[in-house]
Amino acid sequence: MNYKIFGSKTVDIVIEMGLGACIAEWEALARELGENHGVLVYERAGINHSDKSDKERTPTNIAKELMNLLDEIPHDEKLVIIGHSQGGLYASEFCGLYPEMVKGLILLDPLTTEDNRFKKELTAKEFKKSGVDKSKNFFFLETLTKLGMKGFVKKVMCQAPPFAARIEQLWQEIMKEYLGYSKRAIWIQAKKSTHYIHLTEPEIVIESVNILNN
């Protein structure tokens, strides 16, 4: 497993990246967080410089592989887990499997198990009426959503304001439901960002880490 630790060699922050992301994408933020923490950034099996796994690519297996990696690395008893995009799904799974190891969970525009709600709310016929493209592209939208690329989809959908507004409304509803999972949960809206919050507003991620550590 290809990984890099920034800052302290004792890890207390783990970053679960989005689909196809590389360590370099997170390096600037990890270095800044590393001034006060030990930050683990790793590439999941089969991605970039990490060897492939013979296990099915399910959230459970991926979370267990992260646990195996942590077994080889000095780390705090309690960890802050940061999950971006598709990594949000895996980060959530890790927290569900190993709650005793988790200090807090930070989700950045995450892929969720509720994302099929977009297809339920907007039919292919409605999408065709939007004029964005042929109705078959609605199913491409579903695929992109599963791949954690919703940020790109939102930009295209801006050509059809009513549909763009509904997609954003649904997304906000899902995120608000997530707040009910914990009495301590908070929601910080990154108003200047689309999908890559860690690149455009890294201060929000740093603020979230500070909140969890206070």
Image (tube, rainbow, N blue to C red):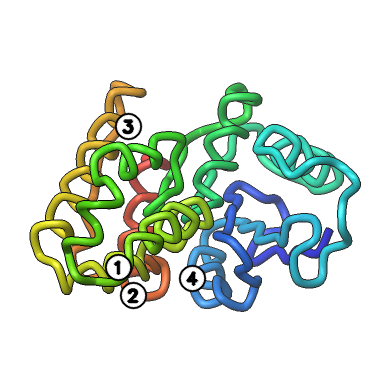
Task: Name the element at disc 2.
Answer: helix
Check if mark 1's residue and mark 2's residue have beta carbons within 8 Å: yes
Residue at point 28%, 65% (across, down):
154
Disc 2 residue type? Thr
Task: Name the element at disc 3.
Answer: helix
In this picture, residue 166 sits left or right of residue 121: left
Give the residue number, with chain letter if any, for mark 1: 194
First in sequence, mark 3 or 4: give its number: 4
Gap between marks 1 and 2 measured at Cα: 8 Å
Query: How many numbered marks, from 0 up?
Result: 4
Residue at point 35%, 23% (across, down):
181
Gap between marks 2 and 4 measured at Cα: 11 Å
Give the residue number, with chain letter if any, for mark 3: 178
In this picture, residue 200 sits left or right of residue 106: left
Q: Which tag is nearer the camera, tag 3 or tag 2?
A: 3
Task: Name the element at disc 4.
Answer: helix
Q: In x, y percent, where is residue 3?
A: 76, 63
Q: Which tag is nearer the camera, tag 2 or tag 4?
A: 2
Give the residue number, with chain letter if any, for mark 4: 29
Q: Which circle marks residue 210 in the picture?
A: none
Residue at point 34%, 66% (across, down):
153
Q: Which tag is nearer the camera, tag 3 or tag 4?
A: 3
Q: Which tag is nearer the camera, tag 1 or tag 4?
A: 1
Q: Residue furthest left?
A: 162
Gap between marks 3 and 2 measured at Cα: 23 Å
Assess disc 3: are there few (<14), some (14-19) or many (≥20) residues with their C-alpha within 10 Å of its C-alpha. some
Disc 4 residue type? Leu
First in sequence, mark 3 or 1: give its number: 3
